[in-house]
Image (cartoon, rainbow, N blue to C red):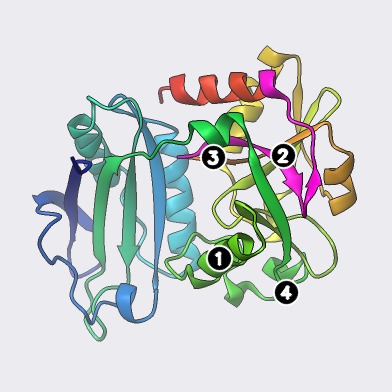
Amino acid sequence: MSAPEHLVLVEHDVEGHATGWVAADPDLPQVRVTDVAATRGDGVFETISIGSGHPQALAAHLERFARSARMLDLPEPDPTVWADAVRALADLLADHEEAWVKTVLTRGVEGQPLPTGWAYGTVSGDFRRERTDGIDVVLLDRGLRSDAATTSPWLLAGAKTLSYAVNRAAAREAARRGADDALFVSSDGLLLEGPTSTLVVRRGTELLTPPAALGILPGTTQVDLFAAAPDWGLQGRVTTLTPSDLTAADAAWLVSSVRHAAPVRSVDGVESAIDAELSAAMNGFLRRRLR
């Protein structure tokens, strides 16, 4: 039996303001082939975890959605309209313990003034193995210095755009090397992020993550984990990290909205320690959070 799929289209006026949303059939064509989402990847998106009908970290996701839109000079997404659309889809997925909704905003059809927007929801995959056994990770050079977001803002480092060809290529390269996922490194040797995840490292009683100023996507899941860290006797801190810091870490995770916290069990083929107790606590917290 296939997973349920639900779709709503977010409508806009000629000035780009969202005016509301309407339900649509996900099995029917909805986006024109001349939409720049298809022809240029010119748009932004967010993926929001849904727990038994409850959107998780919704405000943070919509804030990041708006941030990405501003970086691309897209119309500002109306948080009320988009939140209402996400909640409507979440209600339809309430019978499922884990699901997700993706929000998408594009510049629209080439040569026309209206943006295109939609939100799509379905059931999450089974990530129990990744959350418990962990994942094998390889380090990949992103080919950009760690200050690229400042020196070259037109590269859109740190925006969550539909131009995901590089991210998917990194995932395929990881698979070719016999790994489950990748972790980008700047050309000047600083750890950045995964293609679809944020790095979190435990060193003693601290949880560490790289700063968004390095041109990485601010992690909503990481922020929630840092807020919960005192419950586990830990403190969160944002700091620059190098591959040697990862090697010396007591434990590390790649965290994301849908997969949650996946402990890193090896880096470039070298085994890493897994903190099974903390991994379980993190994933239990992420499954239970309601916002």
Comes first in the chain, label 1 or label 3? 1
In the image, the segment drawn in magenta is 258-277
* Element at label 2: strand
Report which residue position mark 3 lands on.
220
As drawn, the label of residue 172 is 1
* Residue sticking out furthest to the bottom: 111
Residue count near mark 2 (Cα–Cα under 10 Å), binned few <14, some 14–19, many ≥20: many
Comes first in the chain, label 3 or label 4? 4
Gap between marks 1 and 2, in whole Å?
Answer: 19 Å
Report which residue position mark 4 lands on.
143
Q: Quadrant of residue 236?
A: top right
The quadrant the C terminus occupies is top left
Report which residue position mark 2 lands on.
265
Comes first in the chain, label 4 or label 2? 4
Q: Relative to residue 148, is residue 60 depicted above or below?
A: above
Q: Position of residue 245 (x, y in %)?
A: 87, 45
Q: Quadrant of residue 138?
A: bottom right
* Element at label 4: loop
- For the question of whether residue 219 can be seen, the reply is yes
Q: What type is the residue that disc 3 sits on?
A: Thr
* Element at label 1: helix
Q: Relative to residue 212, is residue 40 depicted above or below?
A: below
Comes first in the chain, label 3 or label 2? 3
